[in-house]
Every structure is written in structure tokens, then in C-alpha cells.
Amino acid sequence: MRFSHGWQREPKIRRLLIVGAALLATSCEPGSPVWHSAFPAFGTQIEISIASVPEIRARQASDRIQALFESLHRRWHPWADGELARFNAQLMATGSATADAELLDTIRQAMAYTKLSGGRFNPAVAALVREWGFNEAAPISAPPDPEKLLELLAAMPGQQQIDWLPGRLVSPAGGWAIDLGGFAKGLAVDRAINLLREAGIENAIVNAGGDLRAMGRRNGRAWRIGIRHPRRPGVIAGIDISGDESVFTSGDYERFFEYQGLRYHHILDPETGYPAIGAVSLTVIAGNGALADASATALFVAGPGEWPVLAQALGLELVMLVASDGHIEMTAAMAKRVTLENPDEMSIVIVDESQEVCASQLTVRCL
């Protein structure tokens, strides 16, 4: 799963969403200027872009968002000193833990996606992620001991084994913990958007290290963003975002190491305890950040050919996957939205029987 890459001690995040570049490239267009701010949180760079309001209002809103992200970063870190870390210490020791209502509700929201995703997203993998070393900034030299991974997998409880009591989570045994890393940024971005709305701001982007939610427009035009190419500098596709949409990407290039010629990345399959195979990048566009964040992880784990059924179950219409062999799979709705860079060089599969969509790109074949 896509966990804890945002919380390594000395962040080395290099995932890029080309929002800043696109906005800077269009900054000379007529209309009110777009105000930008940036600050570190969740082990990455948080960027706020606000259009069509005076700078003083934009600064005030950005300050509130920064305070929000810094607070949530402290609360939700799985192992550093904070509420979730203290919760996890109890879980590891006994399988039971207490927390305030806000943290328990956040954990319960995250774990709801475990059932919705058929187990492909599971916040109960924190101990596995730590065993792999993806929480740390230090280089990883080799995969963990397979026997230790089996032990940690066995300790993870099933959904039916968890009881939610007032102020407490109870499971049969210890040895497991919660990592919100595949859900936290999405929920934080959603809360930031709510703060902007409370401030009367209607046109903005909150970009958390390449995962974002946009609302409104930029001087009457859609926000133009780029989706990073997973294997070389630059973008693989561009897309216009307007109204209220979230764009989240899971990729195997965020945190990884190589061992004996194989790449091991941080997106763990909760069924095996090993990095998911088949996909190198998966992008979801959804109505809110929490759904987009968790879904991007789950669909990445599902992999090529398997993600469409899960996407349908999750109610998602806009999905694009880049497979490890370089071919691209996407929904028909996504094919209508994205502009691919160098499409003639790509093998593209549209997950739809619509001949109208198939005819729109000569390189496309339909499932």
C-alpha cells in the first residue's frame, strides 16, 4: 500500500505534479494574479494557489491551512511522538488502544476503505511498512526477512475481528499498528478546502506533494495540471480541472530501492506484505481527496486488468494506469479528459466498448 512515504524523517520526495510550472507559465495572461504559498508538511511540499482574491485574504487563508497541516502531521505520524504514535504503541503491545473521538473517527474512516477495496487498501500495515524501512530516510540495502513479514502479516486482524467501543479499538492480539499514509493527505487536503470555503474563497488548489484538490477556476479558465511520467522527466499527460475535483497518483518512483536487479517500492500489497506488482503509476480523479487517495493505492495494488472492477465498485469513472511494461489502461471517461504526451508512442487500452472513444485515438484498442 502507499503508506508513510510522506513521513520519512528527512523527506526525499521527488514526485512532481506540474501545477506550479503550469501556473507560472500562464501568469502573464490577463486577469487577477494567482497567489502562491508553500510550506513543508507530511514529509513533502504543500503548495497553495489562490485566484481572484486580494493578497491579504489569500495570506490569511494560507496561514490557517499551514497550521492545520502542521497539527495533523504531528497527530497522525505513526511512530513519532503524537496521538497516533501513542495509539500504535498500545496496539503493538496489547491489540487494544484508546484515543480521542477525532482520531478514532479518522482511523475508522480509513479502515472503511479496507472493506470497500476488498482488502487492497489496509491501514493496519504500519508494522510491515516499518519493517521494510520506508519510514526512514536512511538507504535500504535489502528486503526484510520473509519469516518476519509472515509474522507481521499474521498479526493483522480482519475487519470482523475489530471492535469499536466508545473511546477504544479492541482486537484479539497485539503486533500490529495503524498507518494513515495512504489516506491522510487526502483527508488533510479536504479539510484545507473546507477552510478556504469558510474564508469565502472559491478558486484555489491545495497541492500536497503532487496530490491535489482544486475548486473553481483560474481567471475564468480551468486549472491546467500535468501528471508526472513515471520513468522519465516531464509529464505523461495533461488535464484541465475545474469545479471541485481531486487528482491523486500512486507511483512506484516515490520511495524505492533496488536489490539484485529488482526494484522494491513502498506500495505494499496487504495480502503478501511485498510491493505490489504490475503497475508503475495510477491516477484517480474523484470528488474528494480522501476517496481519491485511498482509491489510488487500492487500484495500484489491484494492478493491470484487475483495477476496472474495483474502480466500478468504488464509484470511480476517471482512472489511468501505467503498467510496468509501459502500456496505459484508462477508463473511457478519462480518455476524454486527458491529453497524452506522444500518444503515437504508446499502447493504450480503453476500458470500454464505446467505438466513439476508440476511434478518437488510433493507438487505442478496446477491452
Image: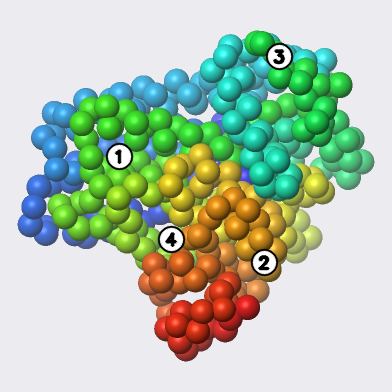
The first of marks 2 and 1 along the sequence is 1
Query: Circle 1: is it few (<14), some (14-19), or many (20+) Cα within 10 Å?
Result: many
Identify which amino acid the numbered label 3 is placed on.
Leu
The first of marks 2 and 3 along the sequence is 3
Question: Taking 323 as reference, is 41 above or below it?
Answer: above
Q: Is mark 2 on a helix, strand or loop?
A: loop
Q: Which of 276 and 108 is in front in this view?
A: 108
The first of marks 2 and 4 along the sequence is 4
Tell me, yes or no, if residue 148 can be seen here: no
Which quarter of the rendering shows the C terminus?
A: bottom right
Query: Circle 4: is it few (<14), some (14-19), or many (20+) Cα within 10 Å?
Result: many
Relative image position of residue 22 (x, y in whole percent): 28, 58
Q: Distance between the residues labelled 2 and 3?
A: 39 Å
Instruction: Judge depth for marks 4 and 3 and give the one in front.
Output: 3
Q: How far apart are marks 2 and 1 (CA)?
A: 33 Å
Left or right: where 220 falls relative to 196? left
Question: Taking 41 as reference, is 81 above or below it?
Answer: above
Query: Circle 2: is it few (<14), some (14-19), or many (20+) Cα within 10 Å?
Result: many
Q: Which of 232 and 318 is in front in this view?
A: 318
The first of marks 4 and 1 along the sequence is 1
Which quarter of the rendering shows the N terminus?
A: top right
Q: Is mark 3 on a helix, strand or loop?
A: strand
Q: What residue did someone put label 1 on? A: 48
Relative image position of residue 261 (x, y in whole percent): 75, 64
Question: Taking 325 as reference, is 82 above or below it?
Answer: above
